[in-house]
Image: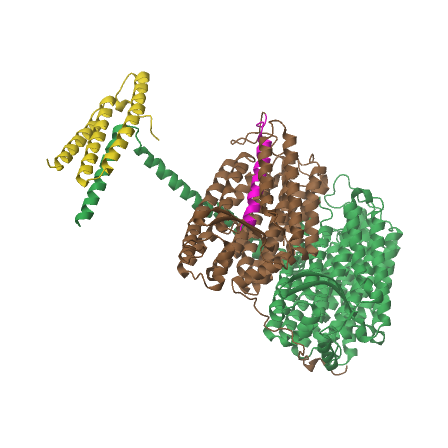
Chain colours: A brown, B yellow, C green
Amino acid sequence: MNGDFPWLTVMAALPFVGGLVVAALPAGKRVLAKNTALAVTLAELVLAIIVTVKFSPDGDRFQFTESYAWIKSFGVHWSLGVDGIGLVLILLTAALMPILVLASWHDADTPQVSASGEAPSGKAAPRSTHAFFALMLMVEAMVVVSFAATDIFVFYIFFEAMLIPMYFLIGGFGGAQRSYAAVKFLLYNLLGGLVMLAAVVALYVVTANHDLGGTGQGTFDLVRISQAVATGELDMNPTAEKAMFLGFMFAFAIKAPLWPFHTWLPDTMTEATPGVAVLVTAMVDKVGTFAMLRFCLEIFPDASKTFAPVIVTLAVIGIIYGALLAVGQTDIKRLIAYTSISHFGFIIMGIFAMTTQGHSGATLYMINHGFSTAALLLIAGFLISRRGSKTIADFGGVQKVAPVLAGTFLVAGLATLSLPGLAPFVSEFLVLVGTYSRYEAAGLFATVGIILAALYVLVLYQRTMTGPVKAGVEKIRDLNVRELVVVAPLMAVLLVLGVYPKPILDVVNPAVEETMSQVERTDPKPSNPIVPAAQPLAAETHGGSK
Amino acid sequence: MNPANYLFLSALLFTIGAAGVLLRRNAIVVFMCVELMLNATNLAFVTFARMHGNYDGQIIAFFTMVVAAAEVVVGLSIIIAIFRSRRTASVDDANLMKW
Amino acid sequence: MTQTSVSSVYLASTEGGAGMHSVAASGVFSATWLVIGLPLLGAAVLLLGGRRTNRFGHWLGTLFALGSFAVAAALFAAMLGESGADRSIDQHLWNWVAVGDFQAEIGLHLDQLSMVFVLLITGVGSLIHIYSIGYMEHDENRRRFFAYLNLFLASMLLLVLANNYLLLYVGWEGVGLASYLLIGFWQHKPSAATAAKKAFIMNRVGDFGLAVAIFLMFTAFGTFSFDEVLGGSAAASDGTMTAIGLMLLLAACGKSAQFPLQAWLGDAMEGPTPVSALIHAATMVTAGVYLITRSAEIFNASPDAQLVVTIVGAITVLFGAIVGCAKDDIKKALAASTMSQIGYMILAAGLGPIGYAFAIMHLVTHGFFKAGLFLGAGSVMHGMNDEVDMRRYGGLRKYMPVTFVTFGLGYLAIIGFPLLSGFFSKDKIIEAAFAKGGTTGYVLGSVTLVAAALTAYYMTRVMLMTFFGRERWKEAPVGAPADWHEPHPHESPVSMTLPMIVLAFGSVFAGGLFVLNDAFVNWLTPVTGFSHGELPFSVWVVTGMATAMVALGVAVAYVQYARREVPAVAPQGSLVTVAARKDLYQDSINEGLVMRPGQYLTRLLVWLDGRGIDGFVGGLAAFIGGTSSRVRKVQTGFVRSYALSMFGGTAVVVAATLMARMA
């Protein structure tokens, strides 16, 4: 149907090769490196659009499938394929990358702040720009593979390998505490990954015991395993299933991040450059939530159902906790990091509510959160780089001197607080409705989050943008053309998806139905569905005369 | 002759070698004691080969000799290097290889 | 429409109500979307156009508002040509969100109720656009102001034209956003920025209620479109209906500044005066009344929820009136009055079918006179160097005759001077309250009567302090800055007085027109239903009592503020006055109950996140690091100690193996 052209492998290879090319460019040619990176990401976006157009929502679940034997003795295949959920996330990645490259244009040109916090001096390393953009492209390649992998082993490899370029991106560029943040990021995620590795091995053993791979072998093929689970061919020991579920979930919960595994995120986002921070929250972390939906629910439906109430509870705590902590922050980037923790709570809650609204909402949420956080963080980054400080108290009255910057920041903030009419509202409402229809209390508590969201966004806006112009702020320039080019598409997407999310939902919904049937869950039915012949109201409204 | 006697001899040699490694300070002597231990095990291997009536032990003995020869080359050169720089061959004077 | 049969059954059994029988939009009605589209386009052009549109932005904005009004008028004319059930029109625009059973469309519903609102919003909206051309003339950001006004119009129209609760929610928060932007329009003033934030956040508390109400509808009915929910509401259990009703009430409380979410309205007066007139008097704050009236079937099915609605209304009527009596800031006095008047409407809406039509009627007449009063206040401020303290006014009638006359007519209308608008609409509410019957009826009736007296008192006070008495503005205020100079009160330009005159006409005649042949009630009955209540005594008794109360209020105010000198500095006053001046301690209560604990909680959590969760992780890392730094001491670097440990280890292993063999 899609021909035999290996679209997904090409999509994975393009940024990878592009990254190598950028890294190999002669030292000193910074502009060439940037332009090459931009061209690669744009080409990737074109590929993503082609794939999206060729994808048929009513067709097979996994499309563009390709499979090549890789490690025969363990039945590992280079298997790629996308369903609606994976597709939209790849599209998100491909769409955000050119924006990030543009937004990070000068981030790696200047020497980085030293660990003691002294102002940078001297010149940047001759290849720092090359390294920065090459690493970003590597991350893009790995994220794409993670979203497209239908082989658990391949997924695992790339899920973990992503840490390497991320480590260097965080540790090499950004604030004074960046190496601390990078190590923390690495250790947290490595720990999760190792636990997951144990679960992956265990899963292989279990499949081998059931002879899923044929001739006594196990398999890593997701489709094969989930079919076997659905048909009862693979009936796991409940204890073993729970243990493996927790192994997978642990890694994804750290990546996502779910409360209480979240503390690496604020440090990372505060210290990393804005572009890298977006890379972390908008894409890399999405691999975690995506994997919950893809692997935890598909392979361990029973365990997922068992643990759903616990995870939903943690998610709700995360929503409220993240929001409250955001209110209490004094650092702009740290504040945004905590808002993300709150938002990831929504996503995870939607996934484990196990309703169609929850799942579609969570998937849409991943997309919308990607765009809204990107907008908020990048504009905050522009602001911070102008003032040279990320402390909220150093700002005030920016609206007066840089109205466009303030205006776009407000729009991004309003998207973050899920203002109806902007994209995140649709997804947040779907998640809340989906959760409420199964877990009323969780839905109610989570809805309190919308009040807190208004609080943290508006407090941030008020303290930075309004009021009298503070000393040090008066010289802040408004957005320049490059920055406008960065911000404008984000604003447009937030607006359009707010009133017309149908294109995304049309692609996502069929995939969600598959997942729902895999976990054998159906939506709760309305308690009083509208019946054609409703009773008329009591006649008490017939009054007498005056 | 009872092959077990060779084993007793091997054990004796090994013990002498071990005691030498632990008690002597001169690097060269320590080194010789290590060689003594290796040869003691070789003797044991060959004896076992004889007792079991196959060649496995003899083959292992050849491996050991090759390894020992390689070790002598590397080890002696290290000792000489240390002696040249420090004018001493006492093992208690060199403790750089720590944490 | 699948719902046709339900509605017709329903219609047959009651006198109107459940007006969700709709026809698809055709002819003129297919232009319904333009009502929203025009101002939305205006906002987009003005915001995206940037400085290029500075020169003509205000004209463009006004033009779009007027265009919207023209479309609305055409729709109204067309609707008059239709009869009965055909006056309810649905226009489907596009499918918005569709996931499983969750089906939300972008669709409009125009019926008699929304028509009233559309005319009020576009009409008063257009007038206020015109007024703002003059009022904001010297503001460098005038274009942005008009963009926000247009955005507000679009959101408010979406709110009243949506055909399902989710889309209504979009309009609901949209007006909240516009209100936020406009209250904080002078962002450089910290007080304005704070007030804007406060308004938005308190509104969000109400929005929580609306969101939960939609959840409840979805879980109970599987839908949240008006025609299905309102048609099927009789099928749900009482508990569900009460829950939905209370959640809707919470939403209404937030938006309409009703107790206990009333605290933001007074501060919202930080916005430019046209904003106060349009958003915080005539239209947005009445959205709560619209919501309750629109959801009539839900409230009709739940007497408990209705009772709570009337209680909230009654409390707010008195609350606003009491606060209004003590305020010296003219805008804040009017804001308190708005709160109180909306309390009337909410109370009436809580009475059920005997009150809905009157709630809306009062809403419309209030829209006229309160907008007129605010514009008058703005005109006064315009001529008085933006002074808002009424103690610094006095005797202004000579200097601003047009303002004085229009303001005066609005004043007479609001206190319920016989035969003016407020007289008819307020009287009907008082009647309906008594007609509720039983103790409740008497309590509610008395509350409305007392509030009528208080209204007369505080409005007379405003009138006297502003336009009569000694010209107190001629003296320098206590602690005046060195550059203080005497204001030169003058009449405002035509662009400002013209809207005031139009609104004054409305204040005078609207009420009379509405009650003529019960025109207004008959118009709304197909949507809201209507039933006559049983008054415990003659109508004339109620009218007489109400008029007497008004006279009493006016008289007391006259004695206090016309016969006696108005002190330039507010006297100490009684305990009640002090409390009322501080808005009955609403801010202190909110602070003590919510803000402070919230701040402590936040601080505690920030501390815990660092010391607790991160501390645990850090502690674990430190433990591992510490242990390894101790253990590494074993590596001495001495060859012989390594050799010894090797021999020791081997000996242990051999010994263990031998023991295992022997055991």
Q: Nearer the viewer, residue C309 or B61?
A: B61
Queried whether the magenta region covers residue A147, the answer comes back as: yes
Occupied quadrant, residue C218: bottom right
Q: Residue at x 14, y 34 (%)?
A: B6
Residue range corresponding to the magenta coloring: A123-149
Residue C133 in sight in this render: no
**Residue in the foreground of this view, choosing between C480 and A414:** A414
Indicate whether residue A85 is drawn in magenta: no
Which quarter of the figure has residue C434? bottom right
Give the x, y percent position of residue C656: 21, 44
Is C553 left, or right, of C77 in this rendering?
Answer: left
| Image quadrant in which the N terminus of chain C is located | bottom right
Q: Residue at (53%, 40%) from the top-left corner?
A: A166
Q: Which residue is pictured at 59% across the width and 32% down the height?
A: A130
How far across and down, in percent of the image, does residue C174 sit? Answer: 71, 56
From this view, report whether residue C434 is shown above or below residue C97.
below
Residue C407: horizontal and vertical position, in percent?
83, 59
Please indicate whether residue C479 sits to the left or right of residue A264 in the image. right
Instruction: Name the side, left or right, on which A159 lies relative to A96.
Output: left
